[in-house]
């Protein structure tokens, strides 16, 4: 049984691992191009000037420098008025920049590891990985009784390296069943799980070195520490799913900013492993869905004439959330007892046509009657037209729901930007490598949600949203938040996560309010990166 202190320490390790998967390739790229050396020698520097000197794509360089600030390695400031970004060194910069070379082995392996899988690996790739394992185990990192700044920075970087080593392997093994109850409760040998037990045992030996396993007579058994991480394998999933982006982050910053872009909405995504992303999201988001359930039950326990006719899930993915909501209503609400008389009209909407096929199949398998239709979150008017023509129902008669979607809207420049707007956001936002001023990102969100106002006036909008936090707050709480990883995965893929307070400000400008009875944020403090809202018009 783990103590509270042990759980907190292991949770801190996990967050630092996530940091590492983003920071290592970014910091090493900036090191190789000379940006870190420049920053350690110069005074406060203007982002635009740095971009010109190093021929960088300003938007993605902005994301990269803000990530370093979130780790406490730089000072980062966005001027409220003209949106100028200034960065400068701090007391940690020179010391930590001199240590960035330590990332070289794992970053080189990351670039060569496309397709690497611990269940079916290329021996040449594995040989390289094992060499890194051995080097890590014999590192000249000796904890000191009295911590110093250099110790703290060395520890930070070692956990980053560790994250790039254990994160991808943990996710692959978790998705493949390695962390099944059988393996977690019994001892096992490498040959029970792998056709190349000699090589696979070297991976298990590395995890044994980290304290995740005990090894005796060639058999392995999870330790309490190992069980902690195994049960949270999905927590690594979303960040690991973006390794295709991190693998080529130097090209995004200093080369072809549109290398992952395609004009074909049905083209396979290259910047993210979507199957892995869905797997990781499913595990990570389970806690939020409990709060969503409470809101849905409250709505569908109202008198029948005050209830929505159904639910529209925008960005339905594989249909799992829609299936879950149906089961909640059927089994836990008054509406569930009268579905024969008052059928529930369910609509799954997605921009990706491949996702629609999966949703249809899963709904049929679950024996749930629902409609599945293509739609664009940026064009609710067209969606309303399509639903009316196809199903003779109005969008406003449905409860609109979506999870972690609005920040992933397609970018468009605001039609009527407020030239007097002053943004308090510290975010770093880009579109195809171009930097987007934070004022315009706020205006874009406002215009985006404004399009939905006519369709949520009756039954509101139920949403889960992701947020950033200010770099100086993240830097003060390294090991307590996944904000750095979120900022990296979303910043380099043109997604727009604003701080919670900035998001709420835009909501208020639209005449909407987040119902205080149903509002939640996670965690429930200044580190909040996730929020749940039931948005309705102010009365």
Image (spheres, rainbow, N blue to C red):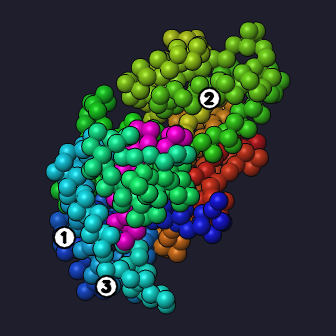
Between 261 and 441, the residue placed more toward the observer is 261
From what the image shows, is residue 538 above or below residue 14? above
Does 153 appear above or below 386? below
Q: Badge 3 is on which residue?
A: 94
Please name the residue shown 41% across and 26% down the image.
355
Quarter of the image for residue 518 reads top right
**Local secondary structure at mark 2:** helix
Question: Residue 347, labelled with which disc?
Answer: none
- Mark closer to the chain start, 3 or 1: 1
- The percent position of residue 50, horizontal first and vertical second, equals 24, 72
10 Å neighbourhood of mark 1: few (<14), some, or many (≥20)?
Answer: some
Q: Which residues are magenta?
A: 158-183
Disc 3 and disc 2: Cα gap in Å? Answer: 51 Å
Q: Which residue appears at 68% of the width and 41% of the height?
A: 290
Residue 419 location in percent, x, y? 45, 58
Tag on residue 32? 1
Q: Is residue 363 magenta?
A: no
Magenta-drawn stretch, dominant element (helix, strand or loop)? helix
Q: Which residue is mark 2?
A: 324
Q: Residues within 10 Å of mark 2 (few under 14, many from 20)?
A: few
């Amino acid at each position: 049984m783990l103590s509270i202190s042990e759980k907190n320490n292991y949770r801190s390790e996990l967050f630092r691992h996530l940091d590492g998967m983003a920071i290592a390739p970014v910091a090493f790229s900036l090191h190789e191009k000379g940006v870190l050396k420049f920053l350690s020698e110069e005074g406060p520097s203007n982002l635009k000037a740095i971009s010109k000197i190093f021929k960088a794509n300003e938007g993605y360089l902005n994301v990269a420098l803000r990530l370093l600030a979130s780790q406490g390695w730089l000072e980062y400031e966005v001027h409220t008025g003209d949106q100028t970004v200034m960065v400068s060194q701090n007391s940690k910069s020179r010391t930590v920049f001199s240590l960035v070379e330590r990332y070289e082995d794992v970053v080189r392996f990351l670039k060569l590891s496309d397709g690497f899988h611990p269940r079916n690996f290329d021996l040449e790739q594995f040989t390289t990985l094992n060499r890194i394992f051995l080097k890590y185990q014999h590192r000249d990192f000796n904890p000191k009784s009295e911590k110093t700044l250099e110790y703290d920075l060395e520890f930070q970087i070692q956990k980053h390296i560790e994250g790039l080593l254990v994160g991808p392997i943990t996710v692959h093994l978790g998705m493949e069943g390695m962390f099944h109850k059988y393996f977690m409760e019994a001892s096992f040998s490498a040959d029970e799980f792998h056709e190349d037990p000699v090589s696979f045992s070297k991976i298990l030996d590395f995890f044994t070195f980290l304290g995740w396993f005990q090894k005796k007579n060639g058999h392995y058994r999870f330790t309490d520490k190992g069980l902690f991480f195994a049960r949270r394998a999905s927590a690594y999933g979303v960040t690991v799913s973006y390794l295709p982006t991190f693998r080529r982050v130097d090209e995004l910053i200093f080369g072809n900013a549109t290398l992952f872009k395609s004009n074909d909405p049905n083209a396979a995504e290259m910047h993210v492993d979507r199957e892995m992303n869905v797997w990781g999201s499913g595990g990570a988001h389970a806690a939020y869905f409990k709060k969503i359930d409470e809101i849905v039950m409250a709505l569908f326990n109202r008198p029948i004439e005050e209830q929505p006719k159904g639910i529209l899930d925008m960005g339905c993915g594989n249909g799992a959330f829609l299936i879950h909501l149906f089961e909640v209503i059927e089994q836990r609400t008054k509406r569930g007892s009268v579905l024969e008389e008052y059928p529930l009209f369910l609509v799954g909407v997605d921009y990706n046509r491949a996702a629609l096929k999966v949703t249809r199949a899963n709904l049929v398998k679950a024996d749930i009657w629902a409609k599945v239709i293509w739609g664009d979150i940026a064009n609710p008017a067209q969606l309303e037209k399509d639903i009316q023509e196809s199903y003779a129902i109005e969008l406003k008669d449905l409860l609109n729901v979506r999870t972690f979607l609005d920040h992933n809207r397609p970018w468009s420049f605001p039609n009527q930007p407020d030239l007097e707007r002053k943004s308090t956001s510290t975010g770093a936002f880009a579109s195809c490598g171009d930097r987007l001023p934070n004022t315009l990102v706020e205006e874009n969100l406002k215009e985006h949600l404004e399009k939905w106002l006519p369709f949520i006036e009756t039954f509101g909008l139920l949403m889960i949203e992701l947020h950033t936090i200010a770099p100086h707050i993240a830097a003060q709480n390294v090991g307590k938040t996944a904000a750095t990883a979120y900022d990296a995965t979303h910043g380099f893929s043109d997604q727009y996560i604003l701080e919670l307070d900035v998001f709420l400000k835009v909501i208020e400008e639209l005449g909407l309010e987040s119902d205080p009875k149903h509002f939640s944020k996670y965690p429930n403090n200044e580190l909040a990166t996730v929020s749940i809202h039931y948005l309705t018009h102010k009365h």
